[in-house]
Amino acid sequence: MLKGIEGLTGILDDEGNLVIVIAQVNVETPFQYFSLAVHDDVLHNLLTGKHNVIDTTLHSGIACHEVANTFQRLALPIVDIMTIAATGSEWDNGGVISRTDTNDKVGYVAPCLFPVCSILDPVYTFSVSRLQTAAGCADAMVHAMEQYFTDETTLLNDGFCESVLRSLMVNGPKCLANPEDYTARAEMMLCCTYGCNDILSLGNTDGGWPCHLIEHALSAYYDITHGVGVAIITPRWMRYILNERTIDRFVKYGINVFGIDASLSKQEIAEKAIDATYKFFESMDIPMHLHEVGIDESRLDEMAHHVAADGELEEAWSPLSESDIKQILVDCL
């Protein structure tokens, strides 16, 4: 096993590679790295770290290749060594960049952004903190949920989503109980990889990813861990949109994911499933109210407007207006 970043950079140095180490990632990092990469004629990106490191490198890689190739929609090849199980960046083709000066958190997707090689060794996740382990588990669970709660689905993909959720609910707590449980870390890492590589959504219509879009406003305005944000939002979103049209999906979720008694009424099953979702996140020691992470009501109107402005959630599985988004945020306080 490589002994940290020093071991990796040592190997690269020995092979005659140019190594640029950026210790702290923030909103300016893509632009700083872009300047270095263009000046020094970087041909590949090799990165080690978690999703914000990867998203930064993707953003920089696009910029470098656009300058070098007259703005062709290409990017420098990405090779990554994962040190956290969470977003599934090792097998997807998009990223998110925050601009705190404008309170924007914007996603970008392109076929050229799939990594050419990803190295996933669960041992590298042994040292991940309790909070980040729990947040990574929650984020991957919500990835599965965002692809599960939609109109048109397939039995196969429903099963994929349900299996990922059950596995994370078993292995996430095991990783907290014993951070060096290789089997639990490995299965959680694999679940996170499958959670966001589009396999779970094959054959399913797009549900709009409402919990992620609402959370992006939170983490654009405040310094909040993304996985914590979606864990806070998701049960409130579930309860807010539970109605006659959506209830059958929650019934299936409750029976197949949590094993709730199918002989109960639909309303009981759905409500128990939502309660169980909340209680699982809470059992992972995730703060479950916005006030616990330093967010009060002062900017809720502004954030709700920010989310609603582009109209995406008006086309979601359960359409949300600006006032709906505001109420969900109020319920999260």
Image: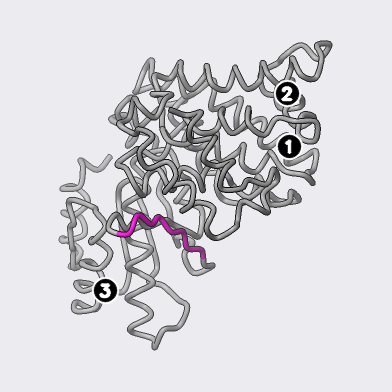
- Viewer can see residue 138: no
200 left or right of 156 in image: left
Q: Is residue 95 magenta?
A: no
Camera-nearest residue between 40 and 120? 40
Determine the secondary structure under disc 3.
loop
Label 3 sits on residue: 42
Please provide percent x and percent y for residue 110: 52, 67
Q: Amino acid at mark 2?
A: Asn
Q: CA distance from mark 1 to mark 2?
A: 10 Å
Instruction: Locate residue 84: give its quadrant.
Output: top left
249 left or right of 171 in image: right
User: Which disc, if any, is residue 158?
Assistant: 1
Please state which of the two labelled residues, at mark 3 or mark 1, is closer to the viewer: 1
Camera-nearest residue between 301 and 8? 301
Mark 1 or 2, nearer chain start: 1
Q: Residue furthest bottom?
A: 70
Image: magenta residue range: 102-109
Q: Amino acid at mark 3?
A: Val
Please provide percent x and percent y for residue 210: 58, 45
Please provide percent x and percent y for residue 156: 77, 40
Question: Residue at coordinates 47% horizontally, 78% vertically from top-left?
Answer: 73
Up/down of 301 relative to 45, above or below: above
Quadrant, the C terminus: top left
Label 2 sits on residue: 256
Q: Amino acid at mark 1?
A: Asp
